[in-house]
Amino acid sequence: MTFSDVLLQQVINGVSLGAMYALLALGFTMVYGIIELINFTHFSVFMVGSFIAMAVLLAVGLSGQSVILTGLPLVAVLLLALVVTMLATGTLGVVIERTALRPLRNVPGTAAMITTIGLAYILTNLVLLLVGAQQENYPNPLPNLTWHLGGATVHLREVLVWVVAAVLMLGLQLFVHHTKLGKAMQATAQDAEAARMMGVDVDRVVLTAFFLGSALAGAAGLIFGLYYNVVDFQIGYTAGLRAFTAAVLGGIGNIPGAMLGGLLIGLIESVGGQLIAVRWTDVIIFSILVLVLVFRPTGLLGRSLAQRS
Amino acid sequence: MDMDATTNPAAGLLAALAAPLKRVPPKVRGRAAVAAFAAFALLLPVIDGNAGDLDAAANATAFAALALGLNIVVGLAGLLDLGYAAFFAIGAYTYGIFASWQLEPAWSSFWQPFAWLGLVERFHVDGVPDVAHLTVSFWIMLPLSGLIAAFFGILFGAPTLRLKGDYLAIVTLGFGEIVPVVVRNTPSLTNGAMGLNGVQAPSLFGYNFGVTSTPYYYVGVALVALFIFVSLRLTTSRIGRAWMAIREDQIAAAAMGVNRVRLKLLAFAVGAGFAGMIGTFYVAKLQTATPDMFMFPVSAMILVMVVFGGMGSPYGVVAGALILQILQSWVLQDVSGWLHDLGELLDNDWLQTIDLTQAIELIFGIVLVLTMLYRRQGLIPARRATRALSLAEQTANVERGGIRRQLRVLAREAAETPGPLLEIRGLVKRYGGIIAVKEVDLKIAAGTIVALIGPNGSGKTTMFNVITGLDPATGGKILLQGRDVTGLPPHELARLGIARTFQNLRLFNNMTVLENVLVGMHSRTTTGALGAVLRPPSVAVEEREARERAIEVLSVFGNRLLPRLDQTVSELSYANRRRVEIARALASQPKILLLDEPAAGMNPGETLELAEQIRSLKDMGLTVFLIEHKLNVVNDLADRIVVLDHGEKIAEGTPAEVHADPQVLEAYLGRKAVAHA
């Protein structure tokens, strides 16, 4: 492989990672856009989603990489896992908002954010107690199909990541721009008070944001499992922080920004890791986070809701 | 409570036992509790000889001390730091590197002076060149690593402290991630993921601490005691009050003369310094350090301790830290053991293998969420409820006829200034495409009251914000006593003598009346962090004088505020809160006082009382610039009235002149109404 092939391969990997981070970043960005809350629970909802999807895949008879499906059965199994997981994590997000976060919505300061840290701990450690600390071999029915792109290889799993992410993001865009509830979401993000006065049910909008964000996190959880083939109770932390960085980089509160930021962070992780060293990846990503927040807190695509001190 | 006592026998018994305690004043009760606890802490190694218990206790002191450090940052200054363990790591590695075999520079004459000082040893093995073994004393490194960590606190803080709360949390989380990664990736200095080994144990007067827990335990207790002392001293000082003011309302703090950036950095540095010292202590005790010891879970655990114990409350966070450590080190193990026994008895495999210590983080999470939902002030709140006022104290003696005594805070030269005290030339303020203030010229003579009136949205408050430096001017000049002060930061303007109140009240809600007024004196007092902790006579005198002046200022409002000195302002009535805000502004010894609708929300009697007080302030030499909608107040008080409409000055003159001005009538009533009049 020549250097340019390696680079191309890393771009392919980066786009796949980026698609996953983008799905995860959308949840951060929607919730932040509406109630200005950094939701650390999102990290663990993603991880829980990965385990729920695993349970579904195991339930339909898969185990590790030993059962390979093709054609319609493959599509059906993946769709089933995706839908069940998204409904389950979406519901989890709604439950979290209703029980623990709504009572704190009008409390000034960082109380709600601290609560989300506590909730993240609870979810993560419940999973730890239930399934243990070991890495789980993820049930993966994908056949080992590959295509060649120059000197680089594209696997079926990467195509799957791209397709799922693209469809979900397109769906989200359609929802936000073409439904009444989606428009109410945009209105609330711009000015919650004015939206309320215009008859928007802000509670319902917030719940919708939590449901959609958490459902997308669940989808990202499934993708993570299929992409890496192993999961454990800690996957939420690293992936979550990177996704959060993606949301900030794109402009937190900005939906297209989260998609762009996710893609960039994925590319930085894979290409940057290749060019510098993998062990410095975290330092690079967090340095970007710090630099963006300090010098351009509105992110690349900006945000009507700039920092208010 | 009474209902419980009659319906629940256990609660009744408890109440009966507690009854004699209730008669002891809370202050005495508190001191007795602290003394009893201190005695227990000192005697613990005698009471409990178990080495494992003492080791856990020594670790608990480290975490209690860390919680005290984070409490300065989060509890007092209100800066949510999610990467606090980074400073713990920096302190740990500072000592670890200077007191281990990690660096083995080749011996040369360069090292000889250090060897004489006992900082290095020449190490000789036959056949290889001699090396220098770093052996810097623990007692030197303890303060030094505090200083180094504090330096990093400033380094990390400087670019980030301007960010608002939740962004700051994320940036600190990022730093918290970066530091262990850097440690892991620089093995030449830190031995990477393997960690430092063979860190030298401290010794004192020839006694080597070795690996027994008792001496470490006592060092830990001493550090906790020191940090409690420092925290308490800071809390009740100029510095601590400024921190709390920033926590409560940054903008009001700045307008009262608090340099936000500098004080936030100070809080970060002090918190980091505590963590650095504890890092050294912890590594000396363990004699090893690995990057994994300083990851996010550690930062989160310390945060749980602070939140659970009570943000801003030194005793609270120590209690929180100890309870969670006891839970972790003893209770969960013991309960697991009991469950194993029970499982054996019942022949139940699941009970026999259960390990509750694994659930510690789950418990931390539950504690955090429950505290936030049901007891946000924590276990031992920083603020206790104040006693109820007696009927006499509650009855306001309405003081008519203004203020009788000359206020010392106003005894200044301001009134004698030749020329205008405040002059505004061509002031422009633009927000995007909207021009909020358009080319306004204005002169305010010393010792006069000038009122700024105009319809809603005419730019009055914007003008105040620009004059006080909260909003930068787009164009034009502001001169105070002939000196150009355009573009100065708000705390600087407060120091120069511009004080203000806010239309929508910006008090420090969780601080007492007295503390609020004392924050107003920030720029007239000088105590620094070190002075606050050591409290030399000069600081004690300054503090006493500041209190006297604060009380003098509060006496402006008769007995309305004096009986309420120690109440938090959130407990006050609306009118009293307005009065506190005026008192706070007066305490800054202003040359000019900007009042933004001071009589809003006051009834006619209270309004009249206030108007007389404002007039007295003018008679004492204070210049007043006033926004007010109650035109009777304006007509009565103002020497001159300035009318603003759509950001433009449309009229200026004496009250009589302004009332006759057709443009003013039009702005207020509309064109048609004027035609009919």
Image: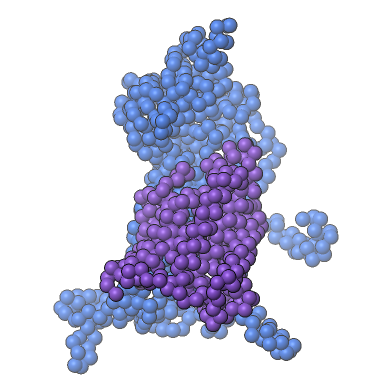
Chain colours: A purple, B blue
Image vertical order of residue B663 relative to residue B290, above or below: above
Kindly tell me whether residue B622 is visible in this rendering.
Answer: no
x, y (%) of residue B312? 53, 55
Q: Quadrant of the N terminus of chain A?
A: bottom left
Residue displayed at 58% across by 6% down: B676
Q: Nearer the viewer, residue A179 or A69?
A: A69
Q: Position of residue B474 (x, y in %)?
A: 36, 31
Q: Residue at x 44, y 16 (%)?
A: B650
Provide residue B188's location: percent of width, then percent of height: 28, 76
Q: Position of residue A108 (x, y in %)?
A: 56, 48
Furthest toward the right, the residue is B7
User: Depth check: B582 or B674 in front?
Assistant: B674
Q: Nearer the viewer, residue B263 or B42?
A: B263
Q: Considering only vertical position in the picture, is B125 above or below B419?
A: below
Q: Quadrant of residue B124?
A: bottom left
Residue B181's image quarter?
A: bottom left
Would residue A88 be found to the left or right of residue B473 on screen?
right
Q: Is residue A205 above or below residue B371?
A: above
Q: Residue furthest front?
A: A71
Extreme-bottom residue of the structure: B126
The front one of B245 and B300 is B300
As displayed, is residue B417 above or below residue B333? Answer: above
The residue shown at (51%, 72%) is A226
Who's the residue at 47% across and 26% down the image? B460
**Quarter-wise, where is residue B203 in the image?**
bottom left
Asked whether residue A168 appears in the rendered view, the answer is: yes
Residue at the outermost top position: B676
Q: How many marks?
A: 0
